[in-house]
Image (cartoon, rainbow, N blue to C red):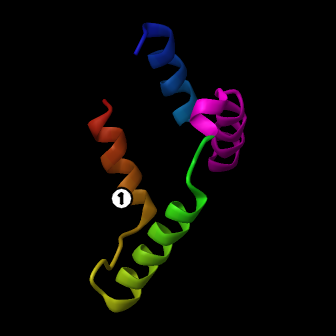
């Protein structure tokens, strides 16, 4: 990642969840068609699989704040 990208990442991290989501949506829209070629059925199946694991207790989950903190720590 370039120095400019790292600086932008750090600045964007300080924005609200809503602002970051809007920017993420915008950025995803700027990607080429090769990135947009997703398998919707596969994603739906994966989401259902994960939902079932959470309901059964096999994957209890954790607060998003903890998951985001782990991601930030890994990217620091």
In front here: 34 or 3?
34
> Which residue is located at x 38 percent, y 81 percent?
54
User: Can residue 15 be seen by looking at this rendering?
Assistant: no
Give the left or right position of residue 29, taking residue 45 as reference. right
- Is residue 67 among what the camera can see? yes
Q: Residue at x 35, y 81 (%)?
A: 53
Q: Residue at x 57, y 30 (%)?
A: 12
Prevalent SS, magenta region: helix
In this rendering, the count of numbered labels is 1
Residue 39 location, quadrant: bottom right
In the rendered image, residue 30 lying in the magenta stretch gets the answer: yes
The extreme bottom residue here reads: 56
Q: Quadrant of the N terminus?
A: top left
Nearer to me, 9 or 57:
57
Quarter the C terminus occupies: top left
Give the quarter of the image for residue 33: top right
User: The residue tagged with tag 1: helix, strand or loop?
Assistant: helix
Question: x, y (%) of residue 74?
Answer: 27, 38
Q: Residues within 10 Å of mark 1 (few under 14, many from 20)?
A: few
Whether residue 24 sits left or right of residue 64 in the image: it is right
For the magenta stretch, what is the residue range? 15-36
Q: Please provide percent x and percent y for residue 38.
A: 57, 48
Residue 58: horizontal and vertical position, in percent?
27, 83
Position above or below: 28 against 56 = above
* Residue 52 highlighted magenta (yes or no): no
Q: Nearer the viewer, residue 39 or 65?
A: 39
Location of residue 68 in the rendering, given as x and y in whole percent from the top left corner: 41, 51
* Residue name at image x 45 percent, y 67 percent: 46
Mark 1 sits on what residue?
66
Left or right of 52 in this view: 18: right
């Amino acid at each position: 990642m370039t120095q400019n990208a790292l600086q932008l990442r750090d600045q964007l991290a300080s924005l609200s969840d809503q602002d970051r989501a809007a920017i993420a949506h915008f950025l995803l829209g700027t990607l080429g068609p090769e990135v947009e070629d997703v398998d919707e059925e596969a994603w739906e199946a994966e989401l259902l699989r994960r939902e079932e694991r959470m309901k059964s207790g096999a994957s209890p989950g954790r607060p998003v704040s903890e998951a985001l903190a782990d991601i930030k720590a890994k990217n620091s």
